[in-house]
Image (tube, rainbow, N blue to C red):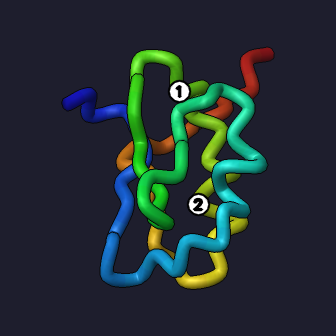
Amino acid sequence: MNALMPLIDSAKCQGCGLCVEICTCGVLTMVDGMVTARNGGKCGWCTMCELVCPTGAISCPFEIVIEDID
């Protein structure tokens, strides 16, 4: 499994699908009413899925750092 993809806590996921709708990379999909992450190599690491999840079921194991270079 690719370490740079969203992690889904199936105990917290209510299957609302908001994360699937917002995922522009196609990494998140619904399987039997639950969200599943697949094809992590295509993840753009935007963390929007983590932000829209109302139950906190998604965590992104990576941190985006923006550095201002003068």
Instruction: Give me the residue at 66% from left, 38% from top.
Output: 46
Q: Residues within 10 Å of mark 2 (few under 14, many from 20)?
A: some
Residue 20 percent across, percent down from the top left: 66, 49
Instruction: Give me the residue at 41% from left, 17% from top.
Output: 41
Identity, as a three-letter code, of the amino acid under mark 1: Cys
Residue 57 percent across, percent down from the top left: 46, 73
Residue 51 percent across, percent down from the top left: 68, 64
- Residue 69: image quadrant is top right
Q: Quadrant of the N terminus?
A: top left
Circle 1 is placed at which residue position? 43
Q: Using the image, determine if residue 10 lies above or below residue 66.
A: below
Residue 3 percent across, percent down from the top left: 26, 34
Label 1 vs label 2: CA separation?
13 Å
Q: Which mark is residue 28?
A: none
State if disc 2 and disc 1 touch (CB < 8 Å).
no
Q: Quick one: 66 or 33, which is closer to the camera?
A: 33
Q: Using the image, determine if residue 61 lies above or below residue 41.
A: below
Identity, as a three-letter code, of the amino acid under mark 2: Glu
Q: How many marks?
A: 2
Local secondary structure at mark 2: helix
Q: Quadrant of the C terminus?
A: top right
Of the image marks 1 and 2, the number of the one nearer the N terminus: 1
Left or right of residue 59: residue 69: right
Q: Using the image, determine if residue 33 lies above or below residue 19.
A: below
Circle 2 is placed at which residue position? 50
Instruction: Give me the residue at 40% from left, 24% from top.
Output: 39
Q: Residues within 10 Å of mark 1 (few under 14, many from 20)?
A: many
Left or right of residue 61: residue 25: right
Local secondary structure at mark 1: loop
